[in-house]
Image (cartoon, grey):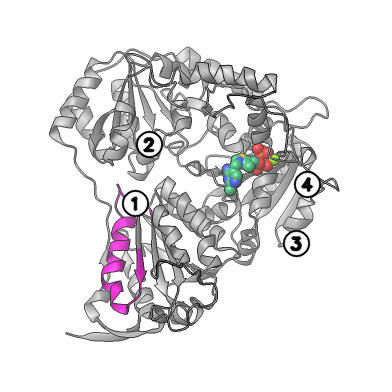
């Protein structure tokens, strides 16, 4: 057998650089790295020699580098990914939040944190946590519950099994998610005679599992028995590249559909059967259909609480749920009838079996009314009033075209955009599985790296911006342009509203309602400018529109700052959301909110 003598780190890099997609590209495009003693000598040396065939990028924070990697994978519909490496200890645990984010959103990313010495000779090495009772524990064990595959590489030959398992998980449509290969520092540097054929290029394709015949027949029967079905399109539609198939299915059988946060942008908003969104951040016309539907057909959705109105929308008596999903876990949620299969395959089989089954027209007038309502919300504010988030969205809508991707993750914007944004196909990127503050700026960079032809628009509140923004400097350094619309309402506006909705006093959310000795005045323009971004402070939505047009052609990221009114939510469309309200309180407002809470929770278990 021919062998190649390499260090374990060199072997990992060599192997990763020849794992290919069907389109002939590297599945792992490259690696984000911040070095420390846990990875600089081993992995760092290996990456240096591979830098022309397997790029390394340097970021400013391990978590946000991983956010960029995750956004890249999401933009590529899970067909390509990136790796992220850190030192041991803080660099590694910085990535745990990002691993959880990828886990919830079911997106592939390869984490390669350095780990403690396999030989334990220098124990405790700098940054090693010491478990008094378990010699096998390191800080990297934090990755276990938030990885779809976890392994510790403590011998060079472990890579022969660990690496193929890692790629299997990242390219598996059902189990897709983050992989953590915790790489012991000494093992990275250790040499081994690897079989040469281990490094032969390998093509990974995403399989499309067929449905079980009995489940398929039951699904056909359920649809045929329905009078008013409604399709709920989730992220699985996009990851299965079944957007066109879903539209054809909906049109042929005349079934209206709504899109979840992850599913939004599967189909262009202008399509007549597109009724917007369901649930807590649902459109009025979409939720009306959901309330009247006798069959909810979920396609690639995991039915999170925002989608289902914490199960008050979808679990009315007599309403059935058919869940078409790649994973049985999502197929059976809340008593739903499963059809476990790839979405594209399942829709093709269903439509063939349904023949010319066609349902009565949905309420097209309600859809028209909805857009008339939102037109009103988009109108610029009167006089000198600060704009609302809806008015900002109106301005951004006017300033962007179908070549744009709107993105966000946490704060007021995700809900407001879900309900109000008129997404072109492929024009919406929302991290709303983990809704992680601080995903936005780095995520925008990852999207732009994946789709350089798109105008990437990052919608971020002052709170999320403050939580993580330093990859702005990376985007400047790497000349990755995107437009940041930074809405400054002086605090955590959405949580402030939620707090009061639950009967609470305004407390510890807005800067002015929080303990302070000096009133906070954050100069966002100076801050973003100091990292090299183009900056503009605008005083009106008209100025915002003009600044956005300018930003579109820029070769650097642009941060546009606008002060907004923290008071109003969108006030449109949505349903109740389950947030537990205290059972006893001296505040009458809390007691009133509790009463409302009890009434609504009683609606959650009425049965399907
Ligand atoms: C990492 C993280 N911490 C806390 C939260 C809870 N949270 C959700 S939105 C939010 C406030 C967001 O404030 P900002 O970005 O200014 O948006 P606004 O609602 O004010 O527009 C908080 C604290 C979160 N989603 N993520
Ligand atoms: Mg804010």
Ligand 1 resides in the quarter of the picture at top right
Q: Secondary structure at mark 3?
A: helix
Residue 496 locus on image (x, y percent): 68, 33
* Sequence-first tag of 1 and 3: 1
Residue 103 locus on image (x, y percent): 42, 50
Q: Secondary structure at mark 1?
A: loop
- Image depth: mark 4 or mark 1 in front: 1
**Image height of 572 relative to 424, above or below:** above
From where the camera sits, is residue 449 visible? no
Label 1, on which residue? 176
- C-alpha span from label 2 to label 4: 40 Å
Label 3, on which residue? 530
Q: Give, as a single range, the part of the protein colored magenta.
A: 151-178
**Image height of 60 relative to 290, above or below:** below
Q: Are marks 2 and 1 in contact (CB under 8 Å)?
A: no
Seen from the viewer's position, the closer of residues 46 and 175 is 175
């Amino acid at each position: 057998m021919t062998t190649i003598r390499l260090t374990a780190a060199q072997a990992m890099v060599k192997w990763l650089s020849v794992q290919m997609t069907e389109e002939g590209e590297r599945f792992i495009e490259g690696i984000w790295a911040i070095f420390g003693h846990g990875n600089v000598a081993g992995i760092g040396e290996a990456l240096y020699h591979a830098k022309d065939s397997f790029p390394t990028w340097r970021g400013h924070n391990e978590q946000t580098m991983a956010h960029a990697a995750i956004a890249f994978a999401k933009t590529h519909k899970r067909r390509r990914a990136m790796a992220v490496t850190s030192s041991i200890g803080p660099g590694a645990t910085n990535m745990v939040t990002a691993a959880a984010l990828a886990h919830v959103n079911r997106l592939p990313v390869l984490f390669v944190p350095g780990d403690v010495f396999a030989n334990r000779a220098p124990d405790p090495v700098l940054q090693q946590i010491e478990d008094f009772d378990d010699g096998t524990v390191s800080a990297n064990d934090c990755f276990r519950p938030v990885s779809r595959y976890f392994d510790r590489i403590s011998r060079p030959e472990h890579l022969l099994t660990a690496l193929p398992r890692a790629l299997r998980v990242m390219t598996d449509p059902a189990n897709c998610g983050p992989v953590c290969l915790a790489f012991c520092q000494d093992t990275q540097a250790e040499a081994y005679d690897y079989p040469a054929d281990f490094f032969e290029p390998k093509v990974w394709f995403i399989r499309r599992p067929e449905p079980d015949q009995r489940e398929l027949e039951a699904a056909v029967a359920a649809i045929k028995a329905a009078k008013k079905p409604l399709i709920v399109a989730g992220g699985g539609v996009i990851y299965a590249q079944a957007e066109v198939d879903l539209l054809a299915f909906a049109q042929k059988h005349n079934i209206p559909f709504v899109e979840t946060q992850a599913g939004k942008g599967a189909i262009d908003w202008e399509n007549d059967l597109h009724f917007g969104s369901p649930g807590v951040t649902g459109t009025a016309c979409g939720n009306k259909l959901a309330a009247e539907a006798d069959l909810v057909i979920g396609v690639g959705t995991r039915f999170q609480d925002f989608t289902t109105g914490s199960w008050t929308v979808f679990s009315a008596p007599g309403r059935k749920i058919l869940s078409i999903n790649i994973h049985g876990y999502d197929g059976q949620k809340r008593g739903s009838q499963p059809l476990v299969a790839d979405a594209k395959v399942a829709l093709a089989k269903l439509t063939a079996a349904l023949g010319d089954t066609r349902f009565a027209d949905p309420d097209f007038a309600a859809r028209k009314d909805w857009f008339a309502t939102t037109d009103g919300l988009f109108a610029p504010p009167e006089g000198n009033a600060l704009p609302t988030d809806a008015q900002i969205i109106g301005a951004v809508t006017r300033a962007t075209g179908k070549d744009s991707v709107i993105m966000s993750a946490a704060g007021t914007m995700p809900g407001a955009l879900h309900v109000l944004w008129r997404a072109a196909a492929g024009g919406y990127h929302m991290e709303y599985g983990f809704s992680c503050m601080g995903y936005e700026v780095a995520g925008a960079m990852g999207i732009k790296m994946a789709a350089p032809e798109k105008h990437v628009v990052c919608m971020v509140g002052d709170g999320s911006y403050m939580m993580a923004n330093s990859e702005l400097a990376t985007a400047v350094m790497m000349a990755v342009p995107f437009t940041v619309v930074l809405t400054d309402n002086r605090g955590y506006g959405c949580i402030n509203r939620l707090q009061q909705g639950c009967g609470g006093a305004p407390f510890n959310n807005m800067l002015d309602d929080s303990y302070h000795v000096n009133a906070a005045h954050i100069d966002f323009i100076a801050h973003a400018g100091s990292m090299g971004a183009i900056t503009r402070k605008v005083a009106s939505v008209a100025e915002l529109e003009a600044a956005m047009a300018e930003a579109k052609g820029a070769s650097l990221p642009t941060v546009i700052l606008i002060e907004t009114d923290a008071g109003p939510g969108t006030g449109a469309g949505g349903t109740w959301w389950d947030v537990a309200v205290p059972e006893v309180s001296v505040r009458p407002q809390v007691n009133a909110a509790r009463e409302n809470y009890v009434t609504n929770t009683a609606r959650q278990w009425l049965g399907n």
